[in-house]
Amino acid sequence: MAFSSQAGQVILRTQTTQGTLEPDIATAGVGIKLRSGSLGPNRDLLIPDPEIGGGRDVVDANLGAVSWSGDYEFYLRMNSFLTLLRAALGTAAAPVTATGITTHTLTPSDAAALPYLSIEEAIGASMETFNYTDAVVNTLHLEAEANGYLMGTASMIAAKQVAGATRTPAPLYDDTPLYVGSNITVTYNSVQLKAKSFSIDINNNFEDDDYQLGSFYVNSLVPKRREITVGFTVREADITLWRSAVYGSSAAVAPGGVTNKQQLVISFSSYDDIPAGTPATKYNASFTIPKFALKPYALGVSGDDIIDDDIEGQALRPVAATPIMTVVAKTDAVAGGGGGATIA
């Protein structure tokens, strides 16, 4: 007998209490459609060192402590993505719903902990079903090219897994629209860039090795320094970006020491309108970074090639009262798993 990967399913649910699988994951969780990915064990076979008086062969082995990790790769759909995004950032304001449209505002949390997720992961149609407790989003990556879809990768870490779980028979899948490069813009210092592609990475740098005596499981998952970086490939229109990145100012003609910190906004929208939205409104989101510094880079000059450059930069937070990034998303107002009124 063989098992098709496509017959599997993954359901996400924000977890209320550490150590406790969210009990309504089957009815209030959101089913996320994946391109690929599952969580796998981080566990060693413990083999003792050679002993004086022993033989040349290994005589025993035991299993050590364990956690689970892996990458979920997906085409971005708004409602399931917002569940991952809140887990990655930590803070979501109360959603605002009016005339069929729900607006979510998310910002990175300053708390010492980030939200946990409960996950149901079914492998194949009937091979195995796992429940994961205390799962976190370690990194969240988005990328798109001009002639392609907006895609994401969530790198997950989970503290506990249980096999033999009951598979949810009819998950509430997120079937909201996909997004393509023609509806994505990158704006730096109020100027829309001639970007050919972009990527954004949120890295929580979780410490995942807090193993303690008397337990197989990691005791805690602690986020350390947060890093938010953005990259884009741009067709150079003038020398402005290069001088800002290398000299610290678009007007400078020699290197300075202060970085040029400008606002960066990444926005995307669907072709489809939100079904019950009035006035007509697309599914959409914007990522606003108030202070973004470009990393120095070399101009890509070669033969008769048009000058396109891969540029990267770092989100900065010089003022504690201002979030390092704010995400505003508009989606449908249908409550429940897969719906936009609440984040699953």
Image (cartoon, rainbow, N blue to C red):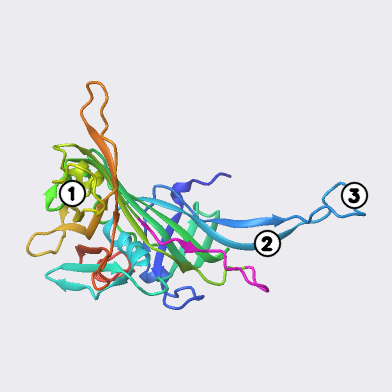
Any magenta on residue 185?
A: no
Q: Which x, y percent locates residue 14?
A: 39, 70
Viewer-side residue, 113 vs 279: 113
Q: What number is the disc on residue 64?
A: 2
Disc 1 + disc 2, Cβ < 8 Å: no
Q: Residue furthest right?
A: 53
Q: Secondary structure at mark 2?
A: strand
The residue where tag 1 is placed is 249
Name the image quarter holding the C terminus. bottom left
Name the image quarter holding the N terminus. top right
Q: Residues within 10 Å of mark 2 (few under 14, many from 20)?
A: some
Question: Which one is closest to the eye, mark 1 or mark 2?
Answer: 1
Kind of residue sitting beneath label 2: Gly
Q: Which x, y percent locates residue 256?
A: 23, 49
Q: What number is the disc on residue 55?
A: 3
The boundaries of the magenta stretch are: 202-216
Determine the image quadrant of residue 255. Answer: top left
Disc 3 + disc 1, Cβ < 8 Å: no
Q: Which x, y percent locates residue 235?
A: 19, 36
Determine the image quadrant of residue 211. Answer: bottom right
Question: Which one is closest to the eye, mark 2 or mark 3?
Answer: 3
Q: How many tags in the picture?
A: 3
**Residue in the picture at 23% in, 68% down:** 105
Q: Which x, y percent locates residue 91?
A: 31, 71
Among the two numbered marks 2 and 3 on one chain, the one whose residue lies closer to the N terminus = 3
Kind of residue sitting beneath label 1: Ser
